[in-house]
Image (cartoon, rainbow, N blue to C red):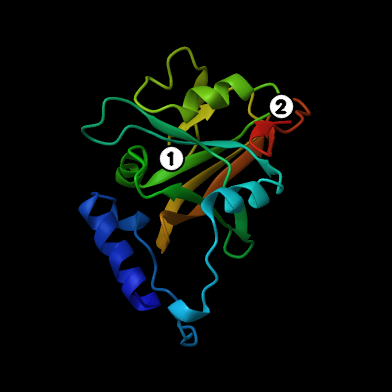
């Protein structure tokens, strides 16, 4: 699927999810046409080896949250280590989420989200948000992020309150771009929670 097709698909997805018009993606800038890699050029990569090698890249750990959209029983959230800043002007961030995620459609319906950057003391909190099917917010202390109203977790090292700006396909994941509406840090100088080679460090 070409870039224009992906942008159109993202618009259709967000519309079908009931995302407010203000949160829908803006028109993408044109880019040069790029030739696809042919099957005979692509080196096969074993998935286990892919995970092993990429596990050497240490990442921070976040929890992405969203307020309950109409019809949802409560707020949504999931643990996410594939988060990054993207652009300074305009201020954009991005995260990646599996296309089979059951939490992502709830965030898409909300049209906005808050990225909670976890501190070193929040490993158990992260594990709680990494499970599927449980009430992830049971016993979790949070307040409302100032613009979106998404859960802002107590004790987090930093928080970034965003509106969904665009969604792109990336293999078995979606690349979600958020426009930053507000952000801040925790009260204390909190060391970050890091993930490296399959475990917290």
Identify the residue at horizontal 67%, vertical 51% (top origin). Answer: 53
The C terminus lies in quadrant: top right
Camera sees residue 130: yes
For this view, does 184 lie left or right of residue 23? right
- The label shown at residue 120 is 2
Q: Nearer the viewer, residue 1 or 105?
A: 1
Q: Which mark is residue 76?
A: none
Mark seen at residue 148: 1
Q: Position of residue 84 (x, y in %)?
A: 61, 52
Question: Where in the figure is residue 175, as x and y percent of width and height?
Answer: 46, 57
Please identify the quarter of the rendering in which residue 69 is found.
top left
- With respect to residue 77, does 9 lie above or below? below
Outermost residue toward the top in this view: 139
Element assignment for label 2: loop
Total numbered labels: 2
Q: Earlier in the sequence, mark 2 or mark 1?
A: 2
Classed neighbour count for the residue bearing mark 1: other residues with Cα under 10 Å, few (<14), some (14–19), many (≥20)? some
């Amino acid at each position: 699927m070409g870039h224009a097709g992906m942008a159109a698909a993202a618009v259709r997805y967000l519309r079908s999810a009931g995302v407010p018009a203000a949160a829908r993606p803006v028109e993408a800038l044109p880019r040069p046409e790029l030739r696809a890699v042919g099957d005979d050029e692509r080196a096969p990569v074993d998935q286990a080896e892919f995970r092993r090698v990429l596990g050497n890249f240490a990442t921070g750990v976040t929890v992405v949250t969203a307020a309950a959209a109409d019809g949802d029983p409560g707020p949504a959230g999931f643990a996410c280590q594939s988060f990054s800043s993207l652009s300074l002007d305009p201020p954009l961030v991005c995260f990646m989420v599996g296309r089979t995620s059951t939490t992502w459609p709830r965030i898409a319906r909300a049209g906005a989200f808050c990225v909670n950057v976890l501190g070193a003391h929040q490993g158990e909190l992260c594990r709680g948000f990494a499970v599927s099917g449980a009430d992830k917010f049971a016993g979790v202390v949070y307040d409302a992020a100032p613009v979106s109203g998404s859960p802002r977790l107590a004790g987090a090292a930093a928080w970034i309150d965003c509106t969904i700006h665009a969604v792109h396909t990336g293999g078995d994941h979606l690349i979600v771009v958020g426009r930053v509406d507000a952000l801040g840090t925790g009260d204390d100088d909190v060391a970050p929670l890091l993930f490296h080679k399959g475990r917290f460090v």
